[in-house]
Image: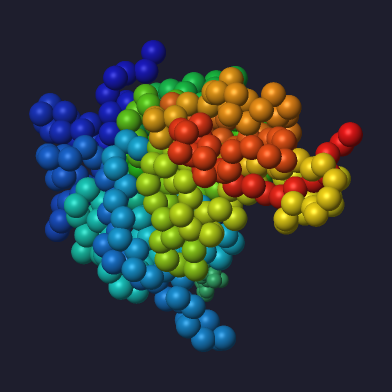
Amino acid sequence: MRSFKSFLPQSLAFVSQQEANVRPTDQPVTPTTQSVQATTSAKPAGTVTFDNLGKTYHSSAGPVHALQDISLAIPAGSIYGIIGRSGAGKSSLLRTINRLEQPTSGRVLVDEIDISTLDENALVTLRRRIGMIFQHFNLLSAKTVWENVALPLKVAGVEKNEIRRRVGELLELVGLQTKHDTYPGRLSGGQKQRIGIARALVHHPEILLCDEATSALDPETTQAILQLLRDINRRLGLTVVLITHEMGVIREICDQVLVLEKGRIAESGAVWQVFGNPQHAATRALLRTLEHDLPEELTQQLLPEPPAYGRFERVIEIRFTGHADIEPNLAHLSAALGASTRLLHGGVDRIQGHAHGRLLLVTGGVGPSADALISQHLCHQAKVLGYVPHPH
Ligand SMILES: Nc1ncnc2c1ncn2[C@@H]1O[C@H](COP(=O)(O)OP(=O)(O)OP(=O)(O)O)[C@@H](O)[C@H]1O
Ligand SMILES: [Mg+2]
């Protein structure tokens, strides 16, 4: 049975240990000039704030402005997704949170402490409060599952019995309790990532950084790992910051999302809002992977204008953006569009309880305009994609 305290964010655990007048075993002994542990007061632990952040790399080809004007707050306890095309600056941004990357300008605050002011000891403490998992797991192949998870505790000088207790509870948390003595080479990708997660949690972090943590996994294993991350987020109350190329991952587990484009913020907000009504071309391009394209044979027939003669039909795309004022109602839609209306394809998902989706309909050549569908509150957005000859 895991103790309640083992699930506490580290700063809270620190307070309770102070009350008991016991030094936590995995804290550095040297006093720090500006201790990040002293930040348990007002806000819940695990808040990250970027204040006008910039990062420029200097390469032989000249300066690369990887991040510019990033101002943003990641709330404590949330699951925060970062998306963007390759090279948009996602990893650079994530790595400034634990100072693996030094900003060129601006500040990163963790629980209101400017982390650039931390001295070496305080930086070690900060990094223990921030776990990180990687796409390729970064495990030591010559060490067993147990040893991989125990290593950071050994390095931190944690006492043997405490290591035994902590590693045991973490391997149980990630479902690897029967694999203590197995070497990573004999494990599946999902199991390896579970070790990565257990290892990232050894110091009771308040923040967990995940850079493409599921990209090397098959869809089913991805689901299981996401479930685990969600579970850990809820049970331990830690902030999860997650980079992914898979929009389904964001839709599945994130509360908020940031879209980066060429090092700048394209947009950010609640997932249901950003995904329901993307404002930026970069977001729309990324979300296209979630959508069905028109079937090939229909695309070939699609005309931009109604044909001059012959019977024709219209292909209409309607969208639900998650706002509560409208729910998808097929009876009302077909009453407005006509009985011959067919659903070509599409789907409606629930993101954080909000209906979000896109339907492609083929309907009679004559009927209400796309704007009329919106004004009748049948959908949030509608447009005629084109015209096709009537099949009969
Ligand atoms: N150490 C470095 N030196 C020079 N340029 C770098 C360095 N690290 C990253 N860059 C450049 O900074 C930009 C942002 O890189 P970053 O790795 O943050 O992007 P990313 O969004 O994580 O991309 P991906 O999705 O491919 O992982 C890119 O143009 C990249 O080439
Ligand atoms: Mg990256």
Question: Could you say which is closer to the camera, residue 242 or residue 33?
Answer: 242
Q: How is the image coloured?
A: rainbow
Residue name at image x 39 percent, y 13 percent: 1
Residue name at image x 29 percent, y 66 percent: 52
Residue name at image x 32 percent, y 26 percent: 7
In x, y percent, where is residue 6?
32, 26
Instruction: Give left or right: position of 66 versus 33.
Output: right
Q: Is residue 382 visible?
A: yes
Q: Where is the C terminus found, in terms of image quarters? A: top right
In x, y percent, where is residue 367?
64, 37
The residue at the far front in this view is 309
Up the image or down, 354 lies above or below 88; here it is above
Question: Could you say which is closer to the camera, residue 195 or residue 325?
Answer: 325
Q: Quadrant location of residue 182? A: top right
Q: Is residue 171 visible?
A: no
Instruction: Give left or right: position of 63 versus 53.
Output: right
Question: Could you say which is closer to the camera, residue 334 or residue 125?
Answer: 334
In x, y percent, where is residue 279?
46, 54
The residue at the far right in this view is 392
Q: Quadrant location of residue 368? A: top right
In x, y percent, where is residue 230?
46, 30
Up the image or down, 68 lies above or below 180; here it is below
Residue name at image x 83 percent, y 50 percent: 309
Q: Quadrant location of residue 185? A: top right
**How many marks are shown on the rendered structure?**
0
Question: Could you say which is closer to the camera, residue 250 or residue 333?
Answer: 333
